[in-house]
Image (cartoon, rainbow, N blue to C red):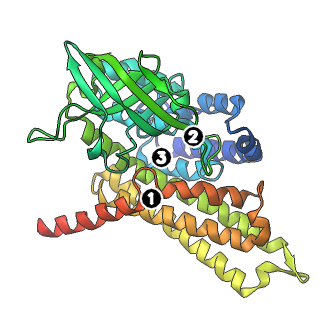
Amino acid sequence: MTLSTQAAEVDDDDFREILTQTRAFVRNVVVPREQEIAETNAIPDDIRRAAKDMGLFGYAIPQQWGGLGLNLAQDVELAMEFGYTTLALRSMFGTNNGIAGQVLVNFGTDEQKQQWLEGIASGEVVASFALTEPGAGSNPSGLRTKAVRDGDDWVITGEKRFITNAPLADLFVVFARTRPADDRGPGIAVFLVPAGTDGVEVGSKDAKMGQEGAWTSDVHFDGVRVPASALVGGNEDVGYKAAMVSLARGRVHIAALSVGQAQRALDESVAYAATATQGGTPIGDFQLVQAMLADQQTGVMAGRALVRDAARAWVDETDRRIAPSVAKLYCTEMAGKVADLAVQIHGGTGYMREVPVERIYRDVRLLRLYEGTSEIQRLIIGGGLVKQAQRG
C-alpha cells in the first residue's frame, strides 16, 4: 500500500484515497497491536516499514523534496485518524512532518533542503526538534544552550530535555542562543546537528506516565562543533521565529490528534454502554450514562469543527497565532474530559490495564503540556486579543 501523487498540490480525489488508506492502516493494522506496543514500549519494525512505504514520514513535506505535500487542512484530517490509536504511531513520524521538518521547509537554505529533506520525507532520516531545556519549556526566550562562533564554525554547548525521538534521531534541529536579546533580535539561532557529531550525547529513554512507544530523552551538547552551513537560513536570528511558526502550526496538529483520541474514547464508551449490564439492564439505558455520552459527543463534534476552522485559517493565512492556540487549548482540555468520562462509564473496568480507555486516559494528559501548555495558550489568546484591539 503506497500513498503517491504527481500534482504539486493534492486534489480532493487523491486526498480522499490517502485518507481512506490511512484510516484502514490505523484501524486494521495498528489498533489490533496496541497492547503489543504498550508492553514492548516500541513500534514494531513491520509497522514502521509500512508507514515508510505509505509516505507517512513525509506527508507534510513538499513534493519537490519527495513528500506528499499535504497542506495543514489535509494534515489535520490525517491527524484525527492517527489519534484514533496509540499516540506512539504519530510520534514515530510526527517530528519529521511537523516541528522539526517544518523548520527546514520554511527557513532552510536551498542547500540545506537539498541535503536533508528527501531523507526526512522517506523516513531514512529521523529529525528531532531540540528546543526544550530544564529552564526553558513553553517559552523559548529562556534558552541557555549557547552557540559561539569559532572561525568558520559554531560550537554548541547545552542540555535539552524531553526531546521526542531523540533515541532514534539522525538529525537534531537545535535551538541555541548566540547572544543576549538586543535591538537586532532575540539572539536565538537554530542549527542542523547530525546525531553522530562529536560531543552529542543522548540520554536514556524517559520513563513516562503514558505514551509507551513514543520515545523521549535528554540530549547533551558538549562543545559540539558544526560548520557555518549548519546555521539554518544562514541567519543567527532565524531561530526564534522558526520555533514560533513551527510550534503554532504544530498546535493545530495536536488539537486534531486530541479529537482523534476523544473519538476513540467515545466509541469505546458507547460500545461498552450498549453491552455491559447492571442488574440485567444495559448501562446505556440509564439516563446518567446517556448524559455522559452526550457530553463526550458534544465535545468531539465541537473540537472537530474547531480544528478544521483553525486549519483553514492557517492555510488562508488569515490567523496563524490566535486560532492555533484556541484549537489546542480547547481540544486538549476536551480530550482529557472525554477520557475521564470514558473511565467513569466503564466503572472499575476502565481502571484496568489492557483496557483502551485506561491507556487513553494516561496518554492524553501529555497533550495539555507539549507544544505549549494550556496556560501558555491562554496567554497567547488573551494577549493577542488585547493587542488586536489596541491596534484598532
User: Which residue is denoted by mark 2 in the rendering?
Assistant: 206
Q: Residue at x 18, y 65 (%)?
A: 388
Give the residue at the far right of this rendering: 280
Query: What kind of element bears circle 3?
Result: helix
User: Which residue is denoted by mark 3 in the rendering?
Assistant: 75
Q: Residue at x 23, y 67 (%)?
A: 385
Q: Is residue 77 above or below residue 156?
A: below
Is residue 74 visible in the rendered structure shown here?
Answer: yes
Position in image of residue 142 (x %, y %): 28, 45
Find residue 8 and report its image quarter: top left
Find residue 129 and report its image quarter: top left
Q: Could you tell me how many numbered marks the image carries?
A: 3
> Position of 100 compared to 178: left or right?
right
Q: Is residue 101 above or below residue 291?
A: above
Is residue 7 visible in the rendered structure shown here?
Answer: no
Query: What kind of element bears circle 1?
Result: helix
Position in image of residue 133 (x %, y %): 38, 41
User: Which residue is denoted by mark 1 in the rendering?
Assistant: 308
Query: What kind of element bears circle 2?
Result: loop
Give the residue at the far bottom of this rendering: 287
Quarter of the figure with the C terminus:
bottom left
